[in-house]
Amino acid sequence: MTSSLTIRAATIADIDTLVALYADDALGQTRDGRPGTDDAYRAAFDAIDGDPNHILAVGELEGRVVATLLLSFLPGLSRGGSWRAQIEAMRVASDHRGGGLGRAMLDWSIEQARARGCALVQLTSDRQRPDAHRFYERAGFTPSHYGFKLSL
């Protein structure tokens, strides 16, 4: 199935599908897909799309968007002034999980990071997503840090 996966930059026409992917689990249902947020999603898309240090990627199978992630490239002074890649909001449609699509998206992201000269790839995952944690560890990621957030 992954051999027919096409990974491309998202377009404005993908927004509704992406929001549906974000809301495609119990945790996402509480945060995404709420009415009245269309303008906010469009503004966020425009900001991402207009910045060369961000790629909002989608994975397509047979013309259907079934996966997404946001890949950001971050400069830093630590690690000798190296860049790092940050993966956020990675989702695979519930009816396609377990088929290798997530791994293909992750591998694509790692290759993009290498091509940009990044020293590391990092990501965060909500503590309420133990299946995702196992997936990332199988892919070679280590839970090396605590993450902290402050909702505003």
Image (spheres, rainbow, N blue to C red):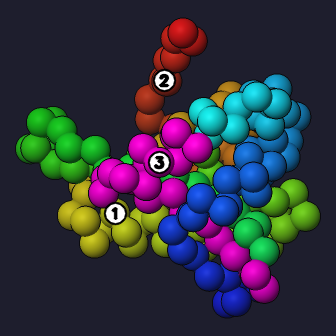
The residues tagged by marks 2 and 1 sit, at their Cα atoms, a distance apart of 23 Å
Report the front residue among 39 and 49. 39
Badge 3: residue crowd in 10 Å (few <14, some 14–19, many ≥20): few
Q: Quadrant of the C terminus?
A: top right
Q: Which residue is mark 1?
A: 113
What residue is drawn where x is 66% and y is 44%? 133
Mark 3: which secondary structure? helix
Give how far across and how far down residue 45 sits, in percent: 52, 48
Camera-nearest label, 1 or 3: 3
Depicted 118 relative to depicted 115: above or below? above
Magenta region: which residues? Answer: 42-63
Quadrant position of residue 41: top right
Residue shown at 70% from the left, 89% from the top: 4
Task: Work out whether residue 71 can be spotted.
Answer: no
Between circles 2 and 1, the one closer to the viewer is 1
Residue under label 3: 46
Q: Is residue 128 above or below residue 17?
A: above
Tell me, yes or no, if residue 15 can be seen here.
yes
Question: Compared with residue 147, is residue 57 higher up or lower down, i.e. above or below?
Answer: below
Look at the image and say whether residue 48 sits in the magenta stretch.
Answer: yes
Of pointers 1 and 3, the one earlier in the residue sequence: 3
Amino acid under label 1?
Answer: Ala
Q: State the SS at label 2.
A: loop
Q: Which residue is mark 2?
A: 146
The alpha-carbon separation of the residues under discs 2 and 3 comes to 31 Å
Q: Residue at x 69, y 76 (%)?
A: 60
